[in-house]
Image (spheres, grey):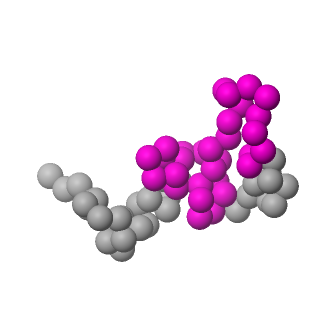
Amino acid sequence: MATKAQVAKSNRTPKFSTRVVRRCELTGRARGVYRKFRISRIMLRKLALEGKIPGMRKASW
């Protein structure tokens, strides 16, 4: 979990556009965040397995 200070800092508009820190909407994690869903890879997998993301299922071949 990210601290409140880290989340507050990432919510501010940065001076330069390359400094944008994308954080997971659910956990606040800064690494491994999918832009399309705005959640981290860990939460994406968990929600997909629970069937809460429509059209997404675990790959098997």
30 vs 49: above or below: above
Residue at point 79%, 29% (across, down): 15
Residue range of the region highlighted in magenta in the rendering: 10-39
Q: Which residue lies furthest to the bottom in this view?
A: 50
Please state if 41 lies on the left or on the right of 2 as rendered. Answer: left
Please state if 56 lies on the left or on the right of 43 as rendered. Answer: left
Give percent across and percent down for residue 14: 76, 34
9 vs 28: above or below: above
Give percent across and percent down for residue 1: 70, 62
Q: Quarter-wise, where is residue 51 in the image? A: bottom left
Q: Residue furthest right?
A: 5
Residue at point 49%, 58% (across, down): 42
Residue at point 49%, 62% (across, down): 43
Whether 14 is among the magenta residues is yes
Give percent across and percent down for residue 39: 52, 55
Between 1 and 10, the residue placed more toward the observer is 10
